[in-house]
Image (tube, rainbow, N blue to C red):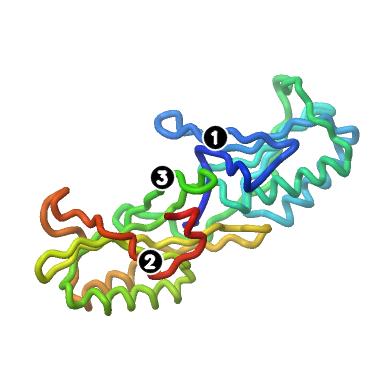
């Protein structure tokens, strides 16, 4: 599972700029459409242009990149339900190719029957997320540069006296799992504490660096064992909203805070 900062509903204005690609936000809800970066150009030499595009695709295979071609018209699309920095970097690399091969923007639509070209086939090497996990998969509200963050959330409660050792142990687990973000909200009541913990990463693929995926089952196992060790249980004590964790956030480990909090 890819955790961390991404874009879906809004473009990171001020962080990235494109001359060829335009951003189409994701639709969400029942419409269920991906966010896309799209450019349609005239290719003076379609064969040479596609060869250079495929070179970029081979160098950066961890993004969904496809094309549609008809004669000298070529449309390139980078799209998915969450676009990390990696996707915007790839779009920037493709823009360099379009400039070098003098492929101007086209205004006319592609005709019906344009050839579809699947240029990459990214694979998440980790097991798919399961709702039976102790975690919930959650996304944040829009933050700096309209960024959102995908995180794993754990709701639990445990004896208040065990809280410092529990948090320290989770920090060690995150270190082993290569997670850069751990923070929580809490609500203390007598000798118990309700916790809402968030596990994530920061910006992914800045400058074209490889994406870092998280094996959720492999993470859930030591986290669940740690909770048991410290006398805790999943879910919160008491009723909502009276006992809902609302104090915080308390930061344990953090990168790219402006994009996340």
Asked which secondary structure carries label 3, the reply is loop
Q: Earlier in the sequence, mark 3 or mark 2?
A: 3
- How far apart are the alpha carbons under marks 3 and 2? 18 Å
Point out which mark residue 25 bears: 1
Residue 190 on image: x %, y %: 9, 68
Please tell me whether residue 204 is drawn above or below residue 40 in the rendered image. Answer: below
Residue 218 on image: x %, y %: 40, 69
Query: Which residue is under mark 3?
Result: 141
Q: Residue at x 53, y 38 (%)?
A: 10
Image marks 1 and 2: residues in contact by CB distance under 8 Å: no
Asked which secondary structure carries label 1, the reply is loop
**Given this view, does label 1 or label 2 mark the residue nearer the observer?**
2
Q: Residue at x 82, y 40 (%)?
A: 98
Query: Which residue is under mark 2?
Result: 251
Residue 145 on image: x %, y %: 54, 46
Few, some or many residues within 10 Å of mark 3 (<14, 14–19, 20+): few
Name the image quarter holding residue 133.
Answer: bottom left
Pick the residue in front: 76 or 54: 76
Few, some or many residues within 10 Å of mark 1 (<14, 14–19, 20+): some
- How far apart are the alpha carbons under marks 1 and 3? 15 Å
Please tell me whether residue 106 is drawn above or below residue 215 in the rendered image. Answer: above
- Left or right for 248, reference 148: left
- How far apart are the alpha carbons under marks 1 and 2? 31 Å
């Amino acid at each position: 599972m890819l955790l961390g900062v991404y874009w879906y509903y809004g473009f990171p204005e001020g962080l990235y700029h494109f001359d060829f690609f335009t951003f189409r936000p994701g639709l969400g809800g029942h419409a269920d459409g991906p966010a896309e970066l799209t450019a349609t150009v005239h290719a003076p030499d379609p064969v040479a242009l596609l060869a250079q595009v495929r070179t970029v695709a081979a160098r950066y295979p961890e993004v969904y990149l496809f094309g549609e071609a008809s004669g000298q018209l070529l449309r390139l699309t980078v799209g998915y339900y969450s676009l990390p920095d990696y996707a915007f970097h790839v779009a920037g690399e493709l823009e360099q190719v379009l400039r070098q091969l003098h492929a101007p923007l086209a205004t006319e639509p592609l005709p019906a029957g344009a050839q579809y070209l699947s240029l990459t086939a990214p694979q998440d090497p980790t097991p798919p997320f399961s709702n039976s996990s102790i975690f919930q998969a959650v996304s944040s509200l829009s933050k700096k540069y309209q960024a959102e963050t995908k995180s794993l959330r754990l709701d639990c409660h445990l004896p208040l006296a065990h809280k410092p050792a529990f948090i320290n142990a989770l920090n060690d687990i995150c270190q082993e799992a290569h997670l850069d973000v751990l923070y929580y909200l809490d609500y203390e009541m007598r000798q118990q504490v309700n916790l809402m913990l968030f596990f994530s990463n920061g910006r992914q693929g800045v400058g074209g660096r490889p994406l870092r995926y998280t094996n959720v089952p492999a993470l859930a196992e030591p986290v669940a064992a740690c909770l048991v060790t410290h006398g805790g249980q999943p879910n919160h004590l008491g009723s909502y909203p009276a006992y809902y964790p609302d104090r915080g956030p308390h930061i344990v480990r953090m990168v790219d805070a402006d994009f996340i909090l």
